[in-house]
Every structure is written in C-alpha cells, then in structure tokens.
Image (spheres, coloured by chain):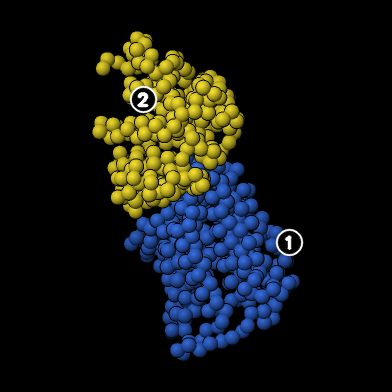
Amino acid sequence: MLQQLANGVFSGSIYALFAIGFTLVFGILRHLNLAHAAIFTTGAFLGIEIATRTGIPFWALLPVVAGIGAVAGVVLERIAFRPLAGRDDEHFAGLISSVAFGGVLIALIQARYGTEPKSFPYEYFPNRLFEVAGLRVTLTQLVTLGLALALMLGLAWLVSATPLGRAMRAVAENPTAARVVGVNVDRVTAGTYALSSGLGTVAGALLALNIGQTDRGLGASIELIGFAVIILGGLGSLWGAMAAGIVLGLAEALTIHYFDSTWKGLVPFALLFAVLILRPRGLFGHIKVREV
Amino acid sequence: MSEPILSVESLSVSYGRVEAVRDVSFSVPEGGMVALVGANGAGKSSVLAAVSGLMRPGKGTVRLDGRDITRWPAHRRVGAGLVLVPEGRQILGTLTVAENLALGAHRRRAQAVPAGELYELFPVLAERRDLPAGALSGGEQQMLAIARAMISRPRVVLMDEPSMGLAPKMVDEVFGVIDKIRASDVTVVLVEQNARRALRTADTGHVLETGAIAHSGPASELLKDPKVVQAYLGVE
C-alpha cells in the first residue's frame, strides 16, 4: 500500500512537470499549445540519442535537452502561433496549428528513429535501490522527484520574483499596458515558450529514464492525464498543476492497489469530473499564474 | 529655439477603412508643452497611439531628436525616453504598486529615478507600495500611471486624458503634478477634453476636428479666439 503511494508520487511528479509547461503558456498567453505532448516525446528521444552518441553524464544531459527544447519552443511559437496573432479566431486557429506542429514533430521523430522503441544505454544511470522505512525506491525515482520539485519551485520563483516573471505577469494581465511601459511583448512570448518547452523536454527525458526506453507514443500516453492535471489544478495555475499532478498520480496508484491496472485510465478522469462538479474552476482555479 | 525634440509630420491613422487622423503635423520644442484638444472622437488619442508606437500610422513620420522613429516598436521608444501615460490609466491591477513602478523603470534602468525619491513626490503610493494596484482608487491609479512614466526619467511624456473620470480635487492634483513635470524641463504633449484647463497649462495648442487640425496657435491666444471659445470652451 505505502509502496503504491510512493510510486504514485513519483509518476505524479512527472505529470506535474508535463503540466506546468502547458499551463504556463496558457496562463501567460491564453494559448492552448497542443504540441506540448510532441515536445515531451521529442525530449525523450533527444535524451536517449545524445546519451547514446556522446555518453555525457546525466547531470550534463538534461541542460542540453532543455536547451534544445527551449529553441524548439521558440520555433513552435513563431510557426504555429505568431502568424495568427490579431486574427479574430487567433486562439482556436492556434490550437489547430499547434496540433499540426505536433504532428510534424512526431513524423520527424518517426523518420529519424523509426517505429521501434529506443532505450538508454545499458546502465547509463546507476541502477541503485534503496530501502527506506520498508519502501523500495530507485535512485532514478528519487532524482526524478527531486528534480521535478526543484524545477517547479524554480519556475514559481521565476514568475513571482524576477524581472522576466514580472514582465510575464504584466503580459498575462494586459498586453497593451505591458507595451505601454516598455515590455517587449514578442520577447516575453518567446521566453514563455522557451521555458515551457524546455520543461516539457526535460519531463520527457525523465520519464524515458524511469521507464528505460521510449517510443513515439510516449507523449500521447501522458497527454490526456496531463490535461486532466491542468484542468483539475485550474488552467493557468502553477501551484494547481503541481498539486493536481501528485493527486492524480496517487489516484492512479490507489486504483491499481484496490482494483487492478485496467481501471487505471478511468479513475483519474472520474476524479476530474467529480472535482469539476464540486469546484468548476479546479482545485486552485482562483490562483492564476499572474498571482503566483 | 533649436530643433524640436518631437515632431509629427503629415500623420494619418486608420482603423480599417475609417480614417481617424488625417494629415496632422505639429512639433514640440525641448521642454515645451503642447495641448491637443477637441471633441470626443476627434482623433486626439489616435495621434498619441501612433506617436507612442501602439499603432502603426498609415502615413506620415514621427521624429524624436530628428530621428525617424515611425517604425520603432513601443518598447524601443520607451527606451529612448518617449513615454505614454495612457487613457484609462492601464495600470496592472494584479501587480503591486512597487511592481508597476519597477516595470516603468526597467527599460531605462541607468537613468531611473530611485524609488525612494519618487515616493516623496507621490506619498500616497509609498503607503500602498505592497498592495495590488487594482486596490487603489481611481485618482491613486492615475497618480501611479504618471509615476510609472516619470520613474524612467523620460524626455517626452505623452498624457492621454489624465483628468478623465476624476473628482475635481483629484483633477487639481493631477494638474499640479503636470506643473511639476513642466518645471523639471520635461517635454509634455497633453490630450484633454478639459480644453480650457489644458490650454492654460500649455504653451501651444492644436484643436482637432474630425481627425484634422482645425486651429493652432499659442495657447493663450486660442483661449481668447472667439471661434475656439464658442465651439470648444463654452462660457465659463
């Protein structure tokens, strides 16, 4: 039982890391970026390819993956969102063009890596097992949880306490007012996508590391639960995404414990509907990114 | 007087097919003050939107220190010392007073007025510095909008209807602040519906009528011009 709960926390932290990148873009720019799952998958393949080719250690791998992800995010915004700015159907059109961008990314992944799963090199990450108070946890799980928490808290700090975060919150509230005071809205937009996609690729690489391998369906497998996390936490809420990620991870684990894994897909969504009936704006719906 | 610090040449601004500003030209010498007055919808705010970079003009040129800045984005103009106090204040209500001021300063950090000095000028903001700006009264928000522009030590301030919607006592305070800004040799372009008050403060006035300049002259003369008085100032 406790073991299942611990596992729930570990997978929940990856859900949360996936979700905060998505919810950040929505909170600041009101864009629904449906290419986020493809960015996540890209991170997993990039991590494996770079680790295999260069053998660089894990602590150096993640910043490289995040950097490439950040660039991909800037390109994504340029191609899928910026040309639509100012149109009446800007938000809906962006949703569709981001689906298309994601489709292109997945097709490129298939062209480069084929359809077979790819794995990290054998014993790339030290395979250590700890027993803490009767719980069995791997070093990978501990590192994943620690990194996910650190990245989420780091993002919350960046949004609430740095000049970039201040400019982001200004853009979130009123882009015209932000321009009046001299905020370079285009640059803040690019920066928001860079952060979001950087976090998304790191989340993908971390999940692949935990599973040991990836295939092109990795993003699709987490996408729905990631969106459930975002809605449950309240769209645009960073703290909500963090809490809801863990809650859904736990809900999944408890489902497996009490029923069996065939019910795993159902319970998080049942929980989502239950919460939405009771609190239509999500658990943290009143705390938006701009108020973090 | 030497080269004007700000000049607007043959400016036209359109919203779709509607031309809001037609062939407007004026200039302001350094340290001078120009008032743009006229009825609602005469195009005054559109002139300021084009000068501040919030809108692209259809035609015409905007020059700062003789440099053509017509195609510059808004943030670059702020960096060069051309700052707008927008209509309806446009303060960021979810950010604190201090954060609004910090945003105002960030393009010109080297020149920025230290916050402490600014708070002496605007004591009411000092007391409320950690409150969300949305919690301020209308008059306080207007003071914040002006302070947020002044913190960057601008060379030219564009003010769009700063007295709109304020109680008479606050209107006096706003014009008191404008006098202080003038005294510090900052160039001011003031758009106001309160035409009499604006012309009493400014050196030069331009009266806009359906997007074009109908009358121009020294503000003191416009105040006495029977046509202007009858159409725009009314009987006092």
Chain label for disc 1: A
Counting from the top left corner in percent of width and height, residue B186 is at 45, 33
Q: Which residue is mark 1?
A: A111
Task: Looking at the picture, tell me which residue is in the foreground, B58 or B197.
Answer: B197
| Residue at the image point whose x is 37% and y is 63% from the top | A283
| Image spot of residue B164 (x, y percent) | 33, 31
Disc 1 crowd rating (10 Å Cα; few below 14, some 14-19, many 20+) is: few
> To which residue does mark 2 refer?
B201
Chain under disc 2 = B
Q: Is residue A73 visible?
A: yes
The relative height of residue A124 versus residue B135 in the rendered view (above or below) is: below
Q: Nearer the viewer, residue A61 or A278?
A: A61
Total residue callouts: 2
Q: Could you say where residue A53 lies in the image, as x and y percent from the top left?
A: 74, 71
Query: Residue at position x 41%, y 22% from top?
Result: B203
As drawn, is A119 to the left or to the right of B125?
Answer: right
**The C terminus of chain A lies in quadrant:** bottom left
> Mark 2 and mark 1: span between their CA atoms?
70 Å
Tell me, by letter, which chain the rendering colours yellow: B
According to the rendering, which colour does chain A have?
blue
In the structure shown, which secondary structural element does the residue marked by tag 1 occupy? helix
Query: Which residue is painted at 41% across and 51% down in the image?
Result: B99
